[in-house]
Image (tube, rainbow, N blue to C red):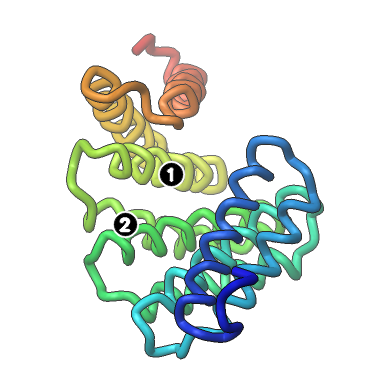
């Protein structure tokens, strides 16, 4: 990065990659300085990219993820609102139905779920469910990404169930968790366990317990 002309296309690419490296180290160590550095480099990369460039949406999506992580660490609503804005703009700037578009839709859904948890605004939860459905529908069934997206949709539907008491939401959440677990198991046999397989199984267990509490029937 230091050896490249600031503001050039190559410089922006290196800054984006460096920001991602800092974020990965933050996720491994929770060192706040790394997350702040990730935000700084991803913001600089975004500002150096024309909004109509191929890579602008990727930079915006990365910066949105940084802000979501900082919200989860510190609870500052401004960070979450900024994450939602960036993910939304990244989604709008990405070819609909592509793998990148699905990733942006999934990330936006996750951020909206967090804001729903903070505000209990049903509109955010409904939007989260819509984006998670679209991300899942645009992704190859059974892939590691598909399993993660199915899990996230299950989370949103389970939140919807807790809000409305509609058992159909809980049943659908369980179906998505079960599909995600099967996909995760298949991926584990081919290439090792995907990183969210334990979370998928935990979420499925909680949803099954909730259905047992509702119906008294063992699954």
Q: Which mark is residue 135?
A: 2
Q: Residues within 10 Å of mark 1 (few under 14, many from 20)?
A: many
- In the rendered image, which quarter is residue 7 located in? bottom right
Going by the image, does 37 lie left or right of 173? right
Q: Which mark is residue 13?
A: none
Image location of residue 36, percent across then percent down: 75, 60
Q: Which residue sits at x=41%, y=26%?
A: 197
Q: Which residue sits at x=59%, y=69%?
A: 1
Image location of residue 6, percent across then percent down: 60, 83
- In the rendered image, which quarter is residue 57 located in? bottom left
Q: Which residue sits at x=63%, y=74%?
A: 43
Nearest the viewer among 119 and 192 is 192
Q: Are marks 1 and 2 in contact (CB under 8 Å)?
A: yes
Name the residue furthest front: 3
Going by the image, does 8 lie left or right of 94? right
- In the rendered image, which quarter is residue 44 located in? bottom right
Q: Is residue 123 visible?
A: no
**SS class, disc 1:** helix
Q: Is residue 26 visible?
A: yes
Q: Which of the marked residues, 1 or 2, is nearer the chain's N terminus? A: 2
Q: Which residue sits at x=59%, y=45%?
A: 24
Label 1, label 2: how many angstroms apart (C-alpha)? Answer: 10 Å
Quarter occupied by the C terminus? top left
Nearest the viewer among 21 and 36 is 21
Q: Which residue is mark 1?
A: 152
């Amino acid at each position: 990065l230091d050896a490249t002309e600031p503001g050039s296309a190559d410089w922006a690419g290196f800054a984006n990659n460096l920001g991602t490296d800092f974020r990965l180290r933050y996720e491994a160590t929770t060192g706040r300085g790394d997350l702040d550095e990730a935000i700084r480099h991803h913001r600089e990369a975004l500002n150096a990219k024309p909004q109509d460039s191929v890579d602008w949406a990727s930079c915006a999506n990365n910066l949105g993820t940084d802000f979501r992580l900082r919200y989860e660490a510190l609870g500052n609503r401004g960070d979450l609102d900024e994450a939602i804005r960036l993910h939304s703009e990244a989604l709008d700037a990405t070819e609909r139905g592509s793998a990148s578009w699905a990733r942006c839709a999934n990330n936006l859904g996750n951020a909206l779920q967090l804001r729903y948890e903070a505000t209990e605004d049903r509109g955010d939860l409904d939007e989260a469910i819509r984006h998670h459905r679209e991300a899942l529908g645009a992704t190859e069934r059974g892939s590691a990404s598909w399993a993660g997206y199915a899990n996230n949709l299950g989370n949103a539907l389970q939140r919807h169930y807790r809000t409305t008491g509609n058992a159909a939401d809980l049943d659908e959440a369980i179906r998505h968790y079960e599909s995600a677990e099967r996909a995760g198991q298949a991926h584990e046999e081919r290439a090792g366990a995907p990183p969210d397989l334990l979370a998928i199984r935990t979420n499925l267990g909680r949803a099954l317990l909730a259905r047992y509490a509702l119906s008294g029937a063992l699954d």
